[in-house]
């Protein structure tokens, strides 16, 4: 299906976006109507066989397709978030920092409802970048059926999304398909990225790395160990004793996957097995995570350790634990350096805000944590944002906040981590890819919950007051009856 007419019209309309009245009308009325119409047109054409190929239960628009050569670098991202800004920045930064960007081929996995719209938005706002959107309702349902959420898990409910687990099913999402009459098979190697990442290195390095017979490569993180997440008493009760609870964890924000070895090791099946144990266990098998613990248990150390540069993490965290702060101090941060950043010390040695030094040379910056750079407007006034060492390969940009610090006598510049992310997306593109309908959802849900709690509290107070009144009335009635009986008895006697 050729949508060049739509792209042209869209670009013409975007010229008017600087007008406030038009922007307001666009996001509240016209844009939803236009997107709805686009979805209907694309789905209709897909049903008629005009969309240039289709997945099992999803939609694939006509885009530049993989030619299946070993020269291609296949990068996968997964999300059902209607806010496309994080995915766009991850893709754009990877493309901009690649020595041969034409080798990059991106696969974005989402829902069948969002797939056609996302495909067109990527085509419009990531011009010159090859992005193919995949969706499979049947596979999505299969993943969802294996996920269970416990209120005692200390995990955010959003982590129970099937797309938090979709990275374990990449080979199924990219299963053999026909495009223009040609079979396109699953690539032998896939690179997976979380959408809350900024790629400052060349992904070609990961494409050519020798995985040494392992099914995947990941970066170790030894400031946390397996037992930070997993209750190994429960694991042993299930009959598994071949684990080291004090082994370093690995973060699955970036994975390099050998597809055939992944299938041979049946890692997807093992992850599903642990999800089943989690569902059936009386006690919480793991806490604080949803997809990371079963992956760690399924891998059990069977992965190639990638360089630390490929997972500079915690750029979205608001504070450092005492252990993390101790590691920071041991790396050369003295009182003067932390004071220059505006850091404060907690009662037990923790530090606020989170201070990231690995961003100076990091090849993948991971904004894991609650302080997402595209949502800094929700951060309370006065709260310090995570501070990042300025990357060495960052073009000269004037940042809103900068701090010059000396660490072990070496000068370093720190900026807000969120501003690094924002430098890869223009205000207009951010406005176009943002989901304004989600702006107040969390707040309104909280307010509604507070209102319902207040109503329940008020009802409980009213019921208690009513019971107290009824109790007093009953006591008064008994007193009157007792008095009446006494008087009657006196009269009769």
Image (cartoon, rainbow, N blue to C red):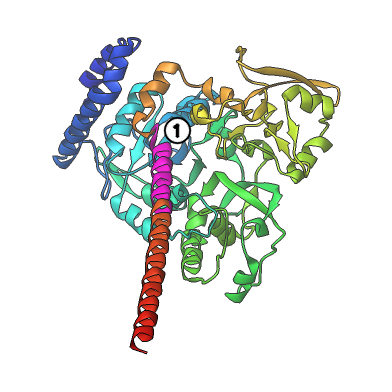
The single residue placed furthest to the left in the displayed view is 48
Question: Residue 64 lies in magenta, yes or no?
Answer: no
At x 21%, y 36%, the residue is 51
Q: Is residue 198 left or right of residue 224?
A: left
At x 27%, y 20%, the residue is 26
Q: Count the marks: how many?
A: 1
The picture quadrant where one finds residue 459 is bottom left
Residue 220 on image: x %, y %: 67, 47
**The N terminus, quarter of image:** top left
Q: Is residue 183 above or below residue 342?
A: below
Q: Is residue 420 left or right of residue 25?
A: right
Start and end of the magenta stretch?
439-457
Q: Is residue 411 above or below residue 103?
A: above
Q: Is residue 446 above or below residue 35?
A: below
Q: Residues within 10 Å of mark 1 (few under 14, many from 20)?
A: many
Q: Main secondary structure of the magenta part?
A: helix
**117 or 97: which is nearer to us?**
117
The residue tagged with tag 1: helix, strand or loop? helix
**456 or 53: which is nearer to us?**
456
Q: Which residue is mark 1?
A: 87
**287 or 62: which is nearer to us?**
287
Residue 258 on image: x %, y %: 52, 50
């Amino acid at each position: 299906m050729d949508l060049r007419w739509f792209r042209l019209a869209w670009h013409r309309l975007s010229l008017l976006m600087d007008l406030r009245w038009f922007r307001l009308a666009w996001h509240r009325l016209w844009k939803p109507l236009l997107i709805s119409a686009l979805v209907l047109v694309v789905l209709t054409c897909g049903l008629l066989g005009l969309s240039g190929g289709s997945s099992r239960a999803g939609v694939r628009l006509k885009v530049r397709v993989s030619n299946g050569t070993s020269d291609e670098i296949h990068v996968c991202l997964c999300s059902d978030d209607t806010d496309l800004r994080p995915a766009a920045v991850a893709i754009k930064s990877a493309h901009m920092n690649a020595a041969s960007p034409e080798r990059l081929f991106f696969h974005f996995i989402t829902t069948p409802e969002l797939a056609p719209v996302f495909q067109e938005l990527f085509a419009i706002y990531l011009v010159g970048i090859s992005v193919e959107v995949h969706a499979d309702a049947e596979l999505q349902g299969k993943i969802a059926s294996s996920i269970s959420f416990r209120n005692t898990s200390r995990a955010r409910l959003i982590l129970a999304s099937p797309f938090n687990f979709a990275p374990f099913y990449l080979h199924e999402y990219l299963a053999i398909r026909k495009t223009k009459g040609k079979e396109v098979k699953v690539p032998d190697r896939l690179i997976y990225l979380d959408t809350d990442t900024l790629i400052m290195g060349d992904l070609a390095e990961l494409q050519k790395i020798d995985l040494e017979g392992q099914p995947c490569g990941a970066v170790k993180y030894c400031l946390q160990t397996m037992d930070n997440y997993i209750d190994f008493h429960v694991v042993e009760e299930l009959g598994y004793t071949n684990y080291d609870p004090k082994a370093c964890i690995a973060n699955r924000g970036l994975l390099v996957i050998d597809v055939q070895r992944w299938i041979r090791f049946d890692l997807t099946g093992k992850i599903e097995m642990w999800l089943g144990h989690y569902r059936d266990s009386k006690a919480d098998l793991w806490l604080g995570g949803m997809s990371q613990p079963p992956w760690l248990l399924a891998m059990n150390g069977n992965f190639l350790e990638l360089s630390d540069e490929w997972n500079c993490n915690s750029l979205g965290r608001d504070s450092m634990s005492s252990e993390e702060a101790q590691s920071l101090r041991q790396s050369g941060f003295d009182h003067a350096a932390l004071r220059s950043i505006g850091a404060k010390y907690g009662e037990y040695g923790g530090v606020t805000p989170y201070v990231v030094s690995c961003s100076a040379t990091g090849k993948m910056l991971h904004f894991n944590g609650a302080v997402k750079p595209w949502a800094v407007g929700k951060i309370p006034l006065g709260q310090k944002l995570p501070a990042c060492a300025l990357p060495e390969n960052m073009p000269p940009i004037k940042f809103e906040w900068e701090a010059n610090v000396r660490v072990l006598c070496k000068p370093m510049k720190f900026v807000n981590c969120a501003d690094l992310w924002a430098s890869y997306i223009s205000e207009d593109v951010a406005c176009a890819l943002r989901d304004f309908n989600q702006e107040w959802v969390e707040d309104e849900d909280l307010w509604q919950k507070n209102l319902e709690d207040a109503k329940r509290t008020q009802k409980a107070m009213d019921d208690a007051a009513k019971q107290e009144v009824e109790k007093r009335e009953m006591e008064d009635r008994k007193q009157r009856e007792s008095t009446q009986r006494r008087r009657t008895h006196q009269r009769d006697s």
